[in-house]
Amino acid sequence: MQKLTTWLLLQLFIFITLSYKDPRCSLPGTELEGITHPGQVMIGAVLPLCVTSGSHYASFREQPPPTLCTMFQFDYYKHLQSLIFAVEEVNKNPDILRNITLGFHWFDSCSVLSISHLATSSLLSDQIKFPSFFRTVPSDTYQSKGLAQLVLHFGWTWVGLLASDSDYGQQGIQLVKQEIIKAGACVAFTEYILLGRADRNALHIVRTIKESTAKVVVVFSSGLDLLTVLDEMLKQNVKGKTFVASEGWSTTTLEAVRKFSHLLFGTVGLAFYSGIIPGFKEFLNKVHPDNSIGGKWVKMFWEKAFSCTFTQQTNKTDSSVTSGNQCTGEESLESVQNSYNDVTNIRVAYNIYTAVHIVSQALEDLRTCNKQDKTCGNIGHFTPWQLVHYMKHVRVTLSNGRQLYFNENGDQPAVYDIINWQLGPEDTIRQMKVGSYDTTVATDEVFSLNSSILLWASGDSKVPHSACSDSCQPGFRITTRKGQPNCCYECVACPPGEISNQTDSLNCFKCLWDQWPNLQKSRCLAKDIEYLSYEEPLGATLTALSVVSSLVPILILRIFAQYKVTPIVKANNYSVSRLLLVSLVLCFLCSLAFLGYPQFQTCLLRQAAFGIVFALCISCILAKTIMVVLAFMATRPGSSLRKWTSPWVSYIIILICFLIQFILSLSCLVISPPLPEFDIRTKPGVIIVECNEGSPSAFWAMLGYLFLLATISFIVAFLARRLPNSFNEAQFITFSMLAFLSVWISYIPASLSAQGKYTVAVEIFAILASSWALVICMFFPKCFIILFRPEINSREHLMKRDRSQTKKVNK
């Protein structure tokens, strides 16, 4: 690919002697001008020195007009001097081409170039088509990969592409596009600078850049091709865009660029490697019209450098001096500083310098070759293919330790400088080297970047952001938008129980069963374990209430024991009352089995103990109720029920009712034992540790049996409520059973609506409430009479009331 701004590659021709000009092989009047410096081996070089003022369409039917070169360029002249310097350096070196001098033919291409200069096109790496092509500049394949990696290095995933409509631009930008897409980034647009149009399609290009959400634009073009687009960007006041420059314009020195300084400030890009040539600056400053190679070109350079003119000799006796300052030859180049003697960044000149050394080393290898080798040739007379052989295997070590060689495609290892455009004084642009891109080092060291000296359009070192969509933070996942590139997406929060712990995660992941996401859904945390513990306020309250409540039946039992000979205690079946009070103590205490961390033993104990203890309690009440009825009926004359009033009848009733519940509970434990389990469904983020209660049918059967006993007691007590008071507990039993049934009927909806530890708390509350109902209704009235109305607790008072109530009943 041909470049118009910088030149890195020499087209090299090797001659043993100077060829004579054959008029049959030339077009008079169109040959390029040049310089010949004699030597035993001649190197041919085609380098631009001046820029042509225009171009002419070649019809191939007429002789083209002479090329007019009118614009002398300091940089181009420095490139010529690097050729001269390198040839002289080789000739002075006794270790290479001893007794053989190099010379050169140089021709001014006037920036109208063949395939030779800066030929970075990847097509030229085809050694079948171009077997003798060697270049000292990297192939565009490397540059395109480097630009793509530079884009990705800064985290830009949404970029626009702009290229000149030429082989250089088209091939280069396509490679960039492939690398960007391969890496997972996206291209917002691809536009071309149409070189065949006067306006370069700038209006459409700039409108596209302005309307695009991409903040970064990769430009694969030359500086001249880009100027029209930049001018249109100024007109449309486009701001906030960062450019990534190809080497074709990353180091351009065009004066027109200055007016775009605020537009291009912050540009980053790749440039050819800038080396150091020891002694080159001194050589440049020693150039003089009287003693330097170059003839008229030296004078042209001198006149431009010092803004003066030499006296023009029209004949030997007459001379005329052109207007302006006259050049005296006393001027000193060390007193001026311009792009000519600035050697801080020599890229093209450095590559011309290395090209001469590569050819010289190949000639040296040919000169010292093994004469038995078929490829060996005579340095005084050799064929091109012999030199090509040594060019393929040449190795040159430069003063900085860098090795130059060619691979199987005729390409050198790719090394680029990373350039950053920064504002200088008076809005000038400084192209600062901020790093390097070196494909010869390890993969993780390809980019060497000094971020501390990077400056962006914002004026600081913060890297601009360019993405179609903002990054999805941890806790979210990416979902693509229909019909849009992958980089354009929505961020969707992870569903409950799932997390994403990376930025721009494609999927969310479920936590382990015993873990739950944090609030940000960025990591899994251990779930809270919930159970009704003794330490928490609710558990401690219920524990204290259970223990304190269990003391009440013990206190009543002591009162009954102390007053067991009194009529009211005797009349209420002291032995069964004592068993009932003991069972009530156990009822209060069995609630403690529901507290604490569920263990295998406590799960087996809690429901079984509850069912058995309450069955004993209700069985005692049922026995008391039946005995009240039997005792009253046995007092009637001629009644045969007196034998059923024995205390053993009460014990038999209690034993039978108790055994039924005991067998039922034992069967449930054997068939379907309750075990600890972890409930992770009821409350998200919480593990509820509970007993699964075994078979639900067995649990409700056990509770239903208690309902049956309580209902029978309630019915019998209700029917016996009008019996004589001295023998009658029926009213108290009626109220106690009514309260008991009310508590457990209320428990059913309450337990179904409660969750976790509150389900256990509801059952404990039902146990305590129903137990207190029995204590209050069955024993508080009796204790009140015993302690505060002793006159009522006498045989005379009971007998008197008994007679009066018997009469009422008989009536």
Image (cartoon, rainbow, N blue to C red):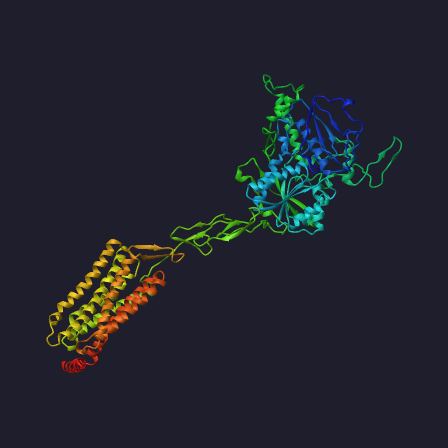
Measured along the vertical axis of the image, is residue 254 above or below residue 81? below
Rendered location of residue 102, percent (x, y): 69, 25
Left or right: residue 580 compared with residue 764: left
Q: Quick one: which residue is furthest to the top in this view?
A: 372
Measured along the vertical axis of the image, is residue 631 above or below residue 669? below
Left or right: residue 770 compared with residue 241: left
Quarter where residue 601 is shown: bottom left
Q: Quadrant of the N terminus?
A: top right
Q: Quadrant of the C terminus?
A: bottom left
Rendered location of residue 682, percent (x, y): 38, 58
Along the line of sight, the residue nearer the viewer: 381 or 748: 748
Quarter where residue 395 is shown: top right
Along the line of sight, the residue nearer the viewer: 667 or 558: 667
Quarter where residue 75 is shown: top right
Along the line of sight, the residue nearer the viewer: 422 or 663: 663
Rendered location of residue 707, percent (x, y): 26, 65
Residue 779 visible within the image: no
Residue 319 visible within the image: yes
Left or right: residue 38 compared with residue 754: right
Along the line of sight, the residue nearer the viewer: 496 or 50: 496
